[in-house]
Image: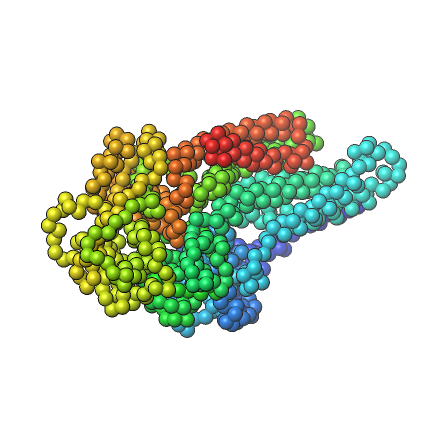
Amino acid sequence: MKILSLHIRKMIFFLFKCRRKNYIMLYNKCYHCGKTCITNKICINNFFFCCSGCFTIYKIINKYNLFKFYELNKNPGISPIYPEKTNNFYYLDTENIYKNIVSYSDKNITIVKFNIPSIHCSSCIWLLENINKIEKKIIKSTVNFTKKNVNITYKNSLYKLSDLAKLLTKIGYKPSITYGDINNKKINNNNYLLYKIVISFFCFGNIMLLSFPEYLGSNNDEWFIKNNNFFILIKFILSIPIISFSSIDYFKSAFLCLKNKSLNIDIPISIGILVLYFRSIYEIIYNIGSGYFDSLSGLVFFILLGKYLQLKTYKYLSFENNYKYYYPIYVTRLKNNLEETILISNLKKGDYIIIKNNEIIPADSILIDGLAMIDNSFITGESNIKEKKLGDYIYAGAKQKGGMIKLKIIKNVNKSYLNNLWINEAFRNKKIPINIRLNLVSKYFTILILIISIISGIIWYYKNLNRVFEIISSILIVACPCGLALSTPFIFGNVIHILGKKGFYIRDISIIERLYKITYIIFDKTGTITEIDKSNIKYFGKKLYNDQKIKIISLLKNSNHPLCKIIYNKFSYIKSHEIIPVTYFEENPGKGIKGLVNGIEIKAGKYSYISRSKLRNKKKYTKTKVFISFEKKKIGYFLIKNYYRNKLQLILKNIGNKYKILIMSGDNDKEKKYLKSLLPYKSKLFFFQSPMDKLNKIKNLQKIGEKILMFGDGINDSLALKQSDVGIVISNNNSFCPNCDIIMDASSFEEIPIFLKYTNFSSKLVLISFIISIIYNIIGLLFAITGHLTPIISAILMPLSFISVIIFSILSTWITAYKLHII
């Protein structure tokens, strides 16, 4: 042992001496990736590059004036794979693989999502989102930094998927394409973490076993003294996979943060691990002791175990959890020539479905019948309506803009895909407040812990030198900001989970934060505060013969408007095979619908829409009416008496105590007096409101500082729902509406005051969770600073921070839900 230490000291002295005499060449860092330039041969503009790959990327960035990439972070690049290794993407152009990888493709554009593991900083995001400046065939690209994904839209003409993959690889961002991507199968990424846990547990168990003689006081035993070096050697060998494999992710994360001049919680953890490791090596070299390999292995094992538990819990509470597969989103399925309304979760490959105007297509399909005018703006972000022919392929997420069509499902419904489209739609149309609490807490908490550990180390240096490294490691390990940072996602995640089971489906946790700030609640009238199925309807006008009734119903069936549904349901005795195809269909929001049925133009809607002549006696037509015309001649109207939802007055009274209330309707003001009697004092009502009127009302309220929550049916009020701070769609067996933040089952309407109270109270629970985490960290640090904690005990206590948050999150949210009678 002494001879080994002597050789090491001589080697260090020799290297130092050579360094002083310039025997060792001073190498520069690569301007692109930051690695050491071994030859210093590649140099331009006083910038050195470690290889031709980095130099090539620099030239590309320089050529296309993308120098901001280097301004955002120092040496932000990744050393690329050599060109000879980038030509293996031709398999992506084969038909079967291409179809499974791309999200969307037509004659003009293709959308594909690639996983890019090398994304690590803001420079990466900036370069990838400006890649269209390098390749003009690329229209746009967006990066999801958390999931390390990039969504790219490119033009199909003379540009292949393999070309895109090669370009990404060439600039240092090689796509990770797995068997799961090609075969649409999920690969469990937790396996890699499990391998690390298993390896660390194996090393930890064996090191503890080899350390038992020391624990039992056998240090003075003659046999133990004789063989102690062998035990130390085995423990050292077992510590190598702990450092090189199980801990490597913490080192990588810490290195990248330091490289980008930022801080996170992995830095103190990495320092704690390295302090124990190098202190142990120091003790072995200088024959001081046997080191802290037992504490080191136990520390890594318990940290990894805690991380695994955290990931599993977060997955359970995640808003992408399985309960979202049961949104109240319906579709009309044809079975044995009979129509039935089913949840999309019950839709299967091979089923035939009916899609009406403005409905979202839930799964990849083939057009069987009807005129399909497809709007892919939900998928591509750009509105461009295209006509499809019989047999054409239509992607999930497309919207029909026209009459009723019949489709055959050729792929099972991918609910997570629809959910991602919903989230992407929100990101396109609203500035969603990104939850940066985790990064901020980690940054400042890390600075504080490093300062405390340095001060404590100095104090213990004079008090007891032998315990300095142990104390510093204990402080660095026991302190954990996880409880502070994860309080919001855990509590709000569980709230979303609980409310989802009650028919109140919230898109993500940022919506709960916005609900807390709401000052104004707006209700649409028809289909929102009224019940379609219970409305009374009568016809007035010229006698309708059976063939006329069939033609009217054939037109109305193409629309999802609540009034069309009410009339259609009245004639439910008309069989589906009697329905006549509509050769032309048009819907004007807030006005009416028209179409050609057997060559006859039929209109349904407001009087001003179906007739050019002015209404002579307006008072005569003050009730809710849907006028019908054949070939521009009015034949009559349907009088509809609205049935308002149960306990509407009580609901409005409860929410009126905290919020301002406004009701907007495209209908006339005949029921104004009755509605006023239901509303709290100072509430407002607006009638004869077109979709643009509703939109402008919300904009004007927002200009004076009001935060708007709007309830609608998602049909005539989609623009208003998108503009509001939070938009809630009341689902009455409706199809999917992307312009909302929350989908609420109509059967849960009476629970609105309780749901709002529950979401608001959850913000207080987050504050309480913060306090619990702060108290835990203060107590843990006090014990560590005073020398009452060993590193291994600190490693066991560290996960207790977020475990306490998990327990508090689950118990507090469930108890609160129980007290409010939600569960």
The residue under the point 59% across, 53% down is: 189
In the rendered image, residue 577, in percent from the top left (x then y), is placed at 37, 64
Q: In this view of the protein, can residue 243 be seen by the observer?
A: no
The residue under the point 55% across, 40% down is: 265
Q: How many marks?
A: 0
Q: Quadrant of residue 270?
A: top right
Residue lying farthest to the bottom in this orientation: 158
In the rendered image, residue 518, in percent from the top left (x then y), is placed at 35, 36
Query: Which quarter of the figure is the N terminus placed in?
Result: top right
Q: Is residue 161 left or right of residue 303?
A: left
The residue under the point 15% across, 46% down is: 620
Q: Is residue 790 left or right of residue 322?
A: right
Q: Quadrant of residue 634?
A: bottom left
Q: Is residue 130 left or right of residue 149?
A: left
The residue closer to the viewer here, 3 or 697, is: 697
In the rendered image, residue 540, in percent from the top left (x then y), is placed at 21, 51
The residue under the point 58% across, 60% down is: 38
In the rendered image, residue 534, in percent from the top left (x then y), is placed at 34, 44
